[in-house]
Image (spheres, rainbow, N blue to C red):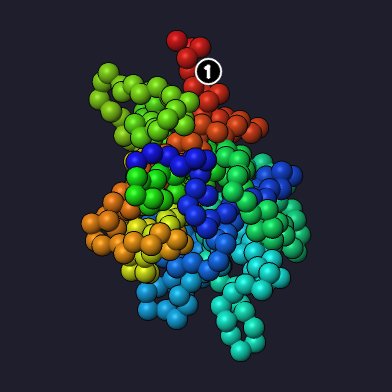
Amino acid sequence: MKPGPLNLITDVDGILVGQAEDHHVRTGVTAIVPGERVTAAADVRGGAPGTRETGTLHVASLVDAVDAVVLSGGSVFGLDAASGAVERLAEEGRGFPTSAGRVPVVPAAILFDLSNGGDKAWGRHSPYSNLGYRAVEAAAHRFDLGNTGAGLGASAGPLKGGTGSASAVTGGGLQVGAIVAVNAVGSTVIPGTSTLWAALFEQAGEMGMPPRSLPAGPLDLDDHLRGFAAENTTIGVVATNARLDKGALNRMAIMAHDGLARAIRPVHTPFDGDTMFALATAKHPDTIDAATLARLGSMASDCVTRATGRAMVAAETLDGMTSYSDWRIGKCQQH
């Protein structure tokens, strides 16, 4: 098992990603856009989530596939990004078939980036619908990490957060990928060190070979919550080319959260809205049994951990938010 050729979620056959940013507002949107409608599921673990249409992903719901998933900054205002995505997909004639035509189904999740210093005085109309439209329009195989899309204005503990992605493929052609927007209340760095929690899972130097040291003394895991409660969240999507139904995908989404738990501490707090979506493009011909599903879930979890680490390494300092890379250099200079 190794990373795919791009080491991005788009290494999964049938998955594209588009991003759009507003640097004046200091926010952005990431759209995960399959080439055709795909089966989807979601699992919400944070205590302060903000989501749209996750109810349609329940195993008992009528809708059996989605047209895209949107991750957005902007807190509740960012839910409008899905509306813009719907408009763009409708122009392409995509969606759930009804007697009145096709209706795009676009679940979404948001993170809080309203206090990052950008100009949020947008008046009656927020920029998010337009950002969602542009993100879908920009969907492609290649995309940038760090201060991009939903991760543009994100923070992670005391450091700059961002957008990260990673992939894994098996010798038998099964593909798994993850994309996350890291905006956690918890820390991505082991206390008393400059080591990312995610560093142990690095593949092929994808995090720039970060240090892997542990503190000499006891590991201080006291929670140091910053800012105002409920101003955080890590949201993401995992995808596979396997043929999975909603129930199996739900299990994959559940297991994907383990990847957050390895990379962020604490995680799934009362102040986070941590949400993971799972998509299956069904491009791989094999029938998936329970053992293979467990393997896919484990791959998804590892990809989420690696994507979180890559988000931190790729993020750049933005005004008062210091990037992990700059912070680590400063820490080394102090010693």
Residue visible at 47% across and 14% down in the picture? 332
Q: Nearer the viewer, residue 194 or 9?
A: 9
Residue 92 image position (x, y, % from top left): 68, 69
- Does residue 301 appear left or right of residue 142 in this picture? left
Left or right: 260, with 75 as reference point: left
Residue corresponding to mark 1: 330
The residue at the far right in this view is: 123
Q: Nearer the viewer, residue 280 or 26?
A: 280
Give above or below for 320 relative to 59.
above
Residue 195 drawn at (x, y percent): 39, 26
Residue 292 lies in quadrant = bottom left
Q: Position of residue 203 (x, y in %)?
A: 40, 33
> To which quarter of the image does residue 61 belong?
bottom left
| Quadrant occupied by the C terminus | top left
Residue 85 appears in view: yes
- Please name the amino acid that badge 1 sits on: Gly
